[in-house]
Amino acid sequence: MAPRITLEDVSKAAGVSRSTASLVIRGSSRIPETTAVKVREAMDQLGYVYNRQAANLRQSRTMTIGLIVTEIINPYFAELAMAVDQITHDAGYTIFIGYSRDLEDRQQEIVASMIERQVDGLLILPALDTDPGSLTKQANAANVPIVLLARHFPGFDYAGSDNVKGAGMLADHLAALGCKTVAFVGGRTAPSFLEREKGLRSALDAHHAELWSREELRSTVSPEGGATALGRLFDQGNLPDAVVAYSDIVAQGVYDEMRHRGLEPGRDIAVASFDDTRIAATQSPPMTSVAGFPQQVGTKGIQMLLARLGEENADTPPQVELIEPQLKIRSSTATWRTRN
């Protein structure tokens, strides 16, 4: 028996997104006629038959989607949220945004509130201490699909950067410069932290270099957290060849603390980070950072959620989409030289 033709097949054949193909079928006036013609031609060629019963069920939806992030001060989260907002608007949905402030209990309250308001689906950048079991129960009880962003817990659809690969690329770069000791500063035991630590350690071990990643180097994801954690390291009399910050926002504090101690980033200690938000390029000196492409993460995440809301994708296993990272090398590492 031939496999059933899905809307995903139609969208690929027409060279458009699945949400665009869906809007054409629903007769939306938002789609240009030239694009609509391509979609209808692809339907005819593939023999696609629209599931009217599922369409009728969809009409009872609220056409709303909930987005929960930790906060909006971090440029990475802001760029991610803006990408989600644009895609949801183009697909005819209204978006509700909540901020967990990285608190699991607050996240639970926001999820419950959004479910009460009958959102069709949820996109969540989970709080650090998220209990996957509790989140699963909330979603299953209301039959609301969830896609996680940037921090991965098993059992959920997920879109995020390939942190292990990106960290390995950064470690290779630092080792090639001659760095023998690398301090990993900031962050706590979120999945993204563990992935970055794993990538750094594996690559540095291969180069016979040492990763310093101890409890006293953990901190909140903030400039103040980065400064405090690095200060504790300096107070112990330790001076690494390189400091890798958990994120660009943590690296702001790393720069401040180094200068407070009379050290210059990029000259006395190589400094690098993750995310490659506008913070990295505008530092002085400009900072090396692993680009995690928040716009791509947000776009992929909402596309996965819209696909999950489609009748063909409701019961498929959880999907994981990793965005390819890119190392942006700048003066904060490129000008560093081995100390005599």
Image: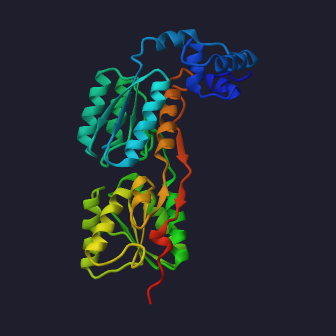
Q: Percent from the top left, x then y, of residue 226? A: 30, 63
| Looking at the image, residue 165 lies above or below residue 100 | below
Position of 263 compared to 241: left or right? left
Rendering quarter of residue 88: top left
- Which residue does the image show at 53% across and 13% down from the upper left? 54
| Looking at the image, residue 103 lies above or below residue 244 | above
Front one among 317 and 188: 188
So how many labels did they put on this image?
0
Position of 158 compared to 129: left or right? right
Q: Quadrant of the N terminus?
A: top right
Residue reaching furthest right?
Answer: 45
| Looking at the image, residue 15 lies above or below residue 160 | above
Q: Percent from the top left, x then y, of residue 258? A: 31, 73
| Looking at the image, residue 23 lies above or below residue 290 | above
Q: Quadrant of the C terminus?
A: bottom left
Rendering quarter of residue 122: top left
Q: Percent from the top left, x then y, of residue 141? A: 35, 25
- Which residue does the image show at 54% across and 70% down from the upper left? 173
Q: Percent from the top left, x then y, of residue 234? A: 28, 77
Front one among 177 and 8: 177
